[in-house]
Amino acid sequence: MRDKPIYVTQPVLPPLAEFVPLLEQIWDNKVLTNNGPFHQQLEAALCEYLGVEHLSLFANGTLALMTAFKALRITGEVITTPYSFVATSHSLIWNNLKPVFVDIDPVTFNLDPRRIEEAITPQTTAILPVHCYGLPANTAEIQRIADVYGLKVIYDAAHAFGVRQADDSVLNAGDLSVLSLHATKVFNTFEGGAIVCKDAKTKQRIDYLKNFGFADEVTVMAPGINGKMSEINAAVGLLQLKTVDESLTRRLEIASMYRELLAGVDGLQMLDIPDTVQWNGAYFPVFVKDTFPMNRDALYQHLRSHGIYARRYFYPLISDMPMYRGLPSASPDRLPVAQQAAAEVLCLPIYPALTFKDIEQVCDCIVSPLKAAQMHALELAEHEAEDLDAEIALDLSPNRPELVFHPLNKSTSELDRG
Ligand code: T4K
């Protein structure tokens, strides 16, 4: 057992000395929230950094998701993935929308476009895919289907900060993309979220909605909510932007180390990142297959007993949770790929401060059951060989007994002949 536990993640923090002057500015100007100067600066800086046109900051990703559906006036049914964090579907329920679960692709672990069309009904108005682990969903195919059926596409891009495909931000796909800037994410403002949109009019509507619906001092244009990010969080974000490239590079280095150290381990599947994708290393899931000597839950416990707190993102499936499992689309036999992924997944620790020694320890711990199984197999084989030698010796002895032990795969008569 390690003296210091290794968690699945650990937030990046800016130097405290750099934060204090920003706090002093807040204390001086007394603007704590409601689109203050740091908030405005962070929105502009994030648009530039991420390569997107418009972005509205939020207090967290869940409020941003909830507001996204209101902004596009989504009604009825929304097609989504069961293989995600609960906030994805909860944000629909809070809008009185019905989630319709569709199975995932076995390679990307994202909504399988081949399953979308059969789930569309006259009540369907939108698709809510997730870029799970920062790996892009099949945005081209999802858009093609959305265009044919006149559906909106809102991406839950909580894991996709900084992800690019074919040299464009993945956040530019669909109608809206929603980020989480939570402590556990690749870029954090302690708590935080954002909606990315493509035009100024939509941003304006989103900004009204996150401020109770106020368009001006006396005009409320919709039943909005309080989703605003505070100045303290925005100030943290401005400082985090200075080191985000470094963090992303380090995450990718860690992912490569895992790949190297776990390469060739029988029974562990890792993410397949296409060459066209600039990934962010948000999570490092491994999928524990039948050929691994222990199942996923046993490996999870084994790591815990050594102070390594890997997490089962995403188990249980959202569709198996009590508030969703009554839905016809939640039936496990309709979601076999998601069911299997949820049963096999284990997200290994990945965060910039993780050291090479930590990574080695995690990998040694994973490989140890495999080594133990191999040792056991070797010992068995050696015992069998010893038994066989002993048996042959007995067979050849002048006082040959009537009953001798024989290996299972050879009959008595065969041995007698041999
Ligand atoms: N959509 C998707 C696809 C999401 O994954 C999420 C959030 C959302 C939407 C909603 O976005 P937000 O409203 O959260 O902005 C965590 C996060 O709370 C959650 O944000 C995240 N997804 C989800 C995947 O993971 P838990 O319950 O696993 O977090 P917790 O507190 O167990 O933290 C995990 C580990 O991180 C801890 O063992 C230690 C470390 N940690 C955590 C926190 C909060 C720290 O070292 N410091 C910290 O402050 O949900």
Image (cartoon, grey):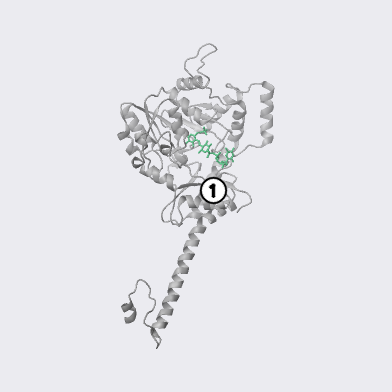
Nearer to the camera, 397 or 252: 397
Compared across the picture, whether 402 is left or right of 161 comes to left
Tell me if residue 407 comes above or below residue 77 in the rendering: below
Q: Position of residue 207 (x, y in %)?
A: 51, 21
Could you tell me which secondary element the residue under label 1 belongs to? helix
Nearer to the camera, 39 or 303: 303
Query: Would you say the beta carbon of the disc 1 residue lies within 8 angstroms of ligand 1?
Result: no
Q: Residue furthest top?
A: 218
Tell me if residue 31 comes above or below residue 378 in the rendering: above
Q: Residue furthest front?
A: 402
Residue at the spot of label 1: 254
Q: Position of residue 169 (x, y in %)?
A: 46, 34
Q: Position of residue 210 (x, y in %)?
A: 51, 22
> Quarter holding the C terminus?
bottom left
Number of numbered tags placed on the structure image: 1
Q: Position of residue 392 (x, y in %)?
A: 40, 81
Residue 353, image quadrant: top right
Q: Residue furthest bottom?
A: 398
The residue positioned 55% from the left and 34% from the top of the image is 182
The residue positioned 43% from the left and 72% from the top of the image is 384
Tell me if residue 242 comes above or below residue 255 in the rendering: above
> Quarter holding the N terminus?
bottom right
Query: What amino acid is labelled 1 in the image?
Result: Ile
From where the camera sits, is residue 272 visible?
no
From where the camera sits, is residue 207 visible?
yes
Residue 38, image quadrant: top right
For mark 1, does the 10 Å Cα neighbourhood hold few (<14), some (14 to 19), or many (20 or more) residues? many
